[in-house]
Amino acid sequence: MLRSINGEWVANLQRMLERLEIVKKTPSIEKGIHLHLGCGKEILDGFINIDKYFEHAQILRCDMRHLPFTENSVDTIYSSHSLEHLPIRPANATLLHWQKVLRKDGMLYLAVPDLEEVCSIMADPNISEEAKWDWYVYVLFGYQIDVDTNTDSCDASLPIDHGQFHTTGFTKTRLHTLLTKTGFEIVQMFNYDGWSTPSIWCEAKKK
């Protein structure tokens, strides 16, 4: 359980899920191009599901840093816990790239771990070592290997999954700064308890 999670954070999980259900219904309400970036195994109806690492007949295999869409052509971008897998500077540039492909008033729906909260948890002497090293270290750095493989293994021969690394992080303040600098207007942003993953939900509109 998160150290500083209070009733508001727990309630915000339901708030996020309610918003997500609205996002998922967008293609059935609004015509246009709707992207689900870093989708993994989650295939959303009506969206163009995109993932660089996951193979599936309904997934477009491409890098979300270089989307094959022209400027001002995309209506919606939804990305959940994917942006933190990019290095720091490419992640910053990717937000600008997404802003360019979105049409005016196009929406970005973004969920990422809260780096500040995770670091605070790892430094908290009241959090058990088991919780830190069985869960929060992976929130910080990613699983790094296939999620079905024992993460406690000392076997150095285990295959590395490059899609499972976290190489940057965000706080609400940092995310707000990056998005406003790249031409977004923040609609709403809040923390939520993402099943013991301290997370940020953000909705931003292209100006």
Image: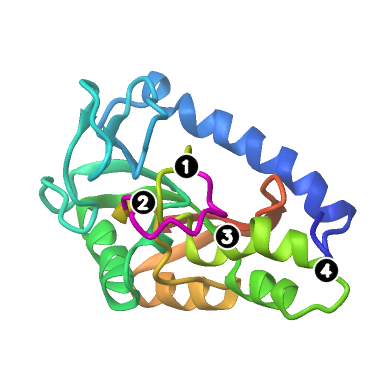
Sequence order check, earlier mark of 4 and 1 = 4
Identify the residue at image location x=42%, y=22%.
29
Q: Secondary structure at mark 2?
A: loop
* Residue at point 24%, 25% (across, down): 56
Q: Nearer the viewer, residue 97 or 42?
A: 42
Q: Is residue 111 magenta?
A: no
Describe the element under mark 4 as helix, strand or loop. loop
Gap between marks 2 and 4 measured at Cα:
29 Å
Q: Which residue is mark 3?
A: 139
Q: Residues within 10 Å of mark 3 (few under 14, many from 20)?
A: many
Q: Do the residues under discs 1 and 2 have CB atoms within 8 angstroms?
A: yes
Within 10 Å of disc 1 (Cα), the crowding (few <14, some 14-19, many 20+) is: few
Q: Residue at x 43, y 28 (%)?
A: 26
Of the image marks 3 and 2, the number of the one nearer the N terminus: 3
Q: Are marks 2 and 4 in contact (CB under 8 Å)?
A: no
Taking 53 as reference, is 145 left or right? Answer: right
* Measured Cα–Cα span from mark 1 to mark 2: 8 Å
The residue under label 4 is 127
Q: Quadrant of residue 173?
A: bottom right
- Residue labelled with disc 2: 158
- Residue 133, image x, y percentages: 66, 63
The residue stretch that appears in magenta = 150-159
Q: Residues within 10 Å of mark 4 (few under 14, many from 20)?
A: some
